[in-house]
Image (tube, rainbow, N blue to C red):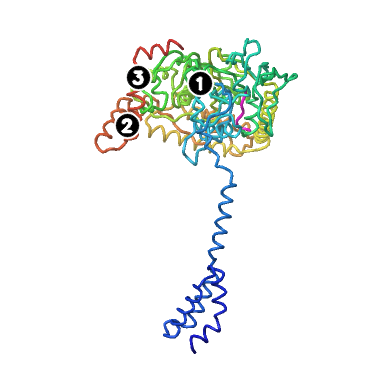
Amino acid sequence: MSAQDVLERIGLAIHSEHTQATHKSGAESDAIAVIRRLLDTDVLKESQLREAIEFVRNTPSAAKKDEKVAVANDAMATKKPEQPNRDNATFPYRTRHMALRFQYDGANYSGYAQNVGSDSDESVERVLFAALKKTCLIQSRDTCQYSRCGRTDRGVSAFAQVIGIQLKSAIPLHAKKIDGGEGQEVSELDLPRNSTDQVTLLVPPKLKHKKKHKETKGDGTDTGDGLSRKTLTELPYAKMLNNVLPPTIRVLGWCPVTPEFSARFSATNRTYRYYFTQRHLNLSRMRDAIQLLVGRHDFRNLCKMDVAKIYNFERLIHSARIMIPDGEYINDMEVGDKNVNTFRRTCYFEIVGQAFLWHQIRCIVAVLFMVGEELESPRVISDLLDINKNPGKPSYNMAPELPLVLHGCGYQNVTFGFSVKNLWAMSCDFERQWEEQSLASERILGAISSLAMEAQVTGGDINSFITLTMDQRRKKEKRLKTKPPGKQSSSTRMDANVLSDKTVIPWGEALSRIESALCIRPSPSGPKEILHVPLMERSRGTTYEEKVQSIIDSSATDGSNTRKKERYEENIIRKRKSPEEDEDFYHRM
């Protein structure tokens, strides 16, 4: 078949495609002539030519491409400009340095302090900053002059945590005083001190927004210079934040503070409470022990040492006492009373100090419990505070974290303002929580009471339990070569409590016989009895000096602990205060 025949079959397609894609000129005929020569010399096959035409047909023409580019350019021209980074932008509002007081239930949090940069962080601080940003009260953590009073650990709660922070204000930037002659700019002293304070100022026109803070009272008279007379109140910080915070975190109140205020360094004292059930604890012995804490002491044996951050373990304790439902525990009238009310009575330690070390309260409470169980003498507190005699901390476990609460933070010349509506809502919520948990407690007490009255056990089963427990205790005593303090000879006490194997008695009476023979009652620690090794006979941890030397040596030899050494140099060597500065710090408290 000749080239002409091929072109006649598909020439129209060629012509139509090229007339759409090119300007009308002699270029079309030249292209056809080239194709004809290729076909005549068998360089180009008909099938190849058809594939080429199909490709051209499915490829957008230049005109179509130009059209798409024009549409894209129009879209870019109408696209909204990219929003600037709020963290780096200038905050177009007045800000004020505030102290916020809030409470939180730490049971479900990883602690108060945020682990910045960690995706798994579940801290109170992370949730708090998310709320502050959501309500547009701050730009970022870096620009809000943030400070905190206490850094509670995982599971620890707070009723009076305090932070210092720069917050957005409802008072316009260029507001002026009415009685200022030519119109003086307002100062911090002219602004509201709490959520109910009102101030009348001259303010510039406000930009229209969909939502406005309700601020105007009166006629809003225009003074002729663009300023209007308005009565203003401050933003309802507690309400705003509580609306977006989870129920486990609640803002209580706020007050303005000076620019120099630091929630941490301006605090004159901190109050911790540790709640516990009395059970068989000897309150009189614990009272004698806790009073030995009062004063200025070195608490390195009653804390967890972080030598990369702390070099001075001296702390000042203002007061330490045991509280019972009737008030402070003072006398010995109730000691030895084993009735049910005392056994399940809720008490708490209250310790007020200038500042506290890492895990200090939980370590103190652990030792106090040993004293209350008559496993240690109250004098053990004095022994642990004597670092010359005991430079290394004995090995012991801390008390559980959940009963610990940061109950108060004290400041000079700082008075928090509260809202009746906010306090009413919080009080209702607290009452709801108390009722739910109180009723749950009563249901459990009902189950305990029913067991004591309705369950029946045989004398043989009771005797077997007592004998088995005594044998286990003797084996442990023999292995440890010690005898628990406060325990009488088990064999002599058993003789008076032997029952006939077939005797059947209520479970409540059985508990009394078991307690008489073994000096134990059912408790949260479980049925397994652990014998006590006196603290002063236990293995000792490394001293402060040994820990520091370990950081220096390991970094110098193999390069390990480099990060810890850098922290040590930053926090201890460069920032270490002179002895005179340390003394001045304690005297100011």
Apparent side of residue 461 relative to residue 542 in the rendered image (left or right): right
Q: Quadrant of residue 72?
A: bottom right
Q: Is residue 357 magenta?
A: no
Distance between the Cα atoms at labels 3 and 2? 25 Å
Residue holding disc 3:
387
| Of callouts 2 and 1, the N-terminal one | 1
**Residue 280 visible from this viewpoint:** no
Q: Secondary structure at mark 1?
A: loop
Boundaries of the magenta span: 247-252
| Mark 3 Cα-neighbour bin, 10 Å: few <14, some 14–19, many ≥20 | some
Apparent side of residue 174 relative to residue 210 in the rendered image (left or right): left
Q: Position of residue 496 (x, y in %)?
A: 54, 28
> Which residue is drawn at the image coordinates 71% and 22% (left, top)?
216
Residue holding disc 2:
565
Which of the numbered marks, if any, corresponds to residue 489? none
- Can you tell which of label 2 and label 1 is closer to the viewer? 1
Q: Is residue 250 magenta?
A: yes
* Dot 3 and dot 2 residues touching (CB under 8 Å): no
Residue that sits furthest to the left in the current view: 557
**Residue type at the position of mark 2:** Lys
Which of the numbered marks, if any, corresponds to residue 263? 1
Distance between the Cα atoms at labels 3 and 1? 31 Å
